[in-house]
Amino acid sequence: MTTLTGKTVLLTGASRGLGVYIALALAKEQARVVCVSRSGAGLAQTCNAVEAAGGSAIAIPFDLCNISQLSGLAQQAQDIVGPIDVLINNAGIEINSDFANYSLAEIQSIFNTNLLAAMELTRFLLPNMMERGSGRIVNIASLAGKKGVAFNSVYSASKAGLIMWTDALRQELIGTGVQATVVCPGYVSETGMTVDPLVSAPKLAGISAPETVANAIVNAIKYNKAEVIVNQNPIMEGLTKLMLSFGQIAPTSVDTIYRWLGVVKFNQRRAENRAKQSYVAVGSKRP
Ligand SMILES: NC(=O)c1ccc[n+]([C@@H]2O[C@H](COP(=O)([O-])OP(=O)(O)OC[C@H]3O[C@@H](n4cnc5c(N)ncnc54)[C@H](OP(=O)(O)O)[C@@H]3O)[C@@H](O)[C@H]2O)c1
């Protein structure tokens, strides 16, 4: 798929954070965006921003944790806009905690939102893409799925699952005209789940502008990339890939690097703040 012009994209997690930047990057490519998430008000703001940028967007408010209702969402979207050309599974949540203190409900909500919803939406939209011999499944994972992150272990596990599922799916789809892509951003500035008024993300680990991540996602679709790591700039991305490769041979050495970079401390502080119930909801900047 070398162009997104005129393509219909279903984007989850479009009400705030990175999703808004992805929707605007898609508008620039003249794609039509179907925006999904729970907040109707957030979706309306995103659709207005897309239309102000000259694009076209519609909102479908939906709670992706209603896993058994996702066939209805897929049907509703196709009834309104016709076939979906690209599915971007971007919605995600994280809950920082030491592992023993997670509740089962928290673990289930992370897996439902980050992994099961992506699988189910794909399961319902894939047959039509395969029939037409064209389509893209794009999963927004995280560097936390490439190397485990302490005090965010359930999120890491869900993102590792997303990465490995995409890897398998991509191979399964060879020759069908449908491609699967996974994008793994590191920390993001200005907006999104790691912007925390109480603790700053560790700069040494690399922090990307949201526009950089959104553009990387659009390029991954246009240039049919299998897996994309986004971390601040090409040099940081090269170093990150080197570190992750080294981690395959010597995992505990990269544990030490993560401690040194401040990744462990950042997540531990967020877990402690949450445990003290002093956690404050993040105020995301909109572009
Ligand atoms: N920000 C980062 O530093 C970073 C780094 C690496 C990867 N990522 C990944 O990038 C993606 C976007 O993250 P973000 O930082 O933009 O997060 P965010 O600001 O917290 O936004 C999350 C989005 O997901 C939606 N969402 C959450 N639960 C949902 C549910 N049950 N049903 C429907 N929609 C739901 C939210 O909308 P509603 O609340 O309106 O439902 C919101 O639009 C996630 O997959 C995240 O894991 C982020």
Image (cartoon, rainbow, N blue to C red):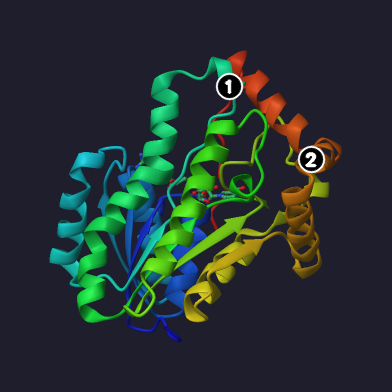
The answer to whether any part of residue 20 appears in the image is: yes
The answer to whether any part of residue 137 appears in the image is: no
Q: How many marks?
A: 2
Queried on whether the Cβ of the residue with tag 1 lies below 8 angstroms from ligand 1, the answer reads no
Query: Where 178 falls versus 256 (above or below)?
Result: below
| Quadrant where the C terminus is found in the figure | bottom right
Mark 1 falls on what kind of element? helix
> In the shown orientation, is residue 248 left or right of residue 163?
right
Mark 2 falls on what kind of element? helix
**In the rendered structure, which amino acid carries the disc numbered 2?**
Tyr
- Residue at numbered disc 2: 258
- Residue at numbered disc 1: 99
Name the spot of residue 2 as percent of width and height, x first: 45, 86
Q: At x 53% / y 39%, what residue is drawn? A: 157
Say few, some or many: other residues with alpha carbon within 10 Å of mark 2 (under 14 / 14 to 19 / 20 or more).
some
**In the rendered structure, which amino acid carries the disc numbered 1?**
Phe
The reply to whether dot 1 and dot 2 touch (C-beta < 8 Å) is no
Q: At x 41% / y 54%, what residue is drawn? A: 14
Name the spot of residue 199 as percent of width and height, x first: 72, 32
Query: Where 103 falls versus 245 (above or below)?
Result: above
Mark sitting earlier along the chain (1/2): 1
Query: Where 1 falls versus 225 (above or below)?
Result: below
Q: At x 70% / y 59%, what residue is drawn? A: 231
Q: Which of 280 and 76 is in front in this view?
A: 76
> In the shown orientation, is residue 125 left or right of residue 223?
left
Q: At x 65% / y 62%, what residue is drawn? A: 230
Q: Quadrant of residue 201?
A: top right
Q: How far apart are marks 1 and 2 (CA)?
A: 18 Å
Q: Quadrant of residue 8?
A: bottom left
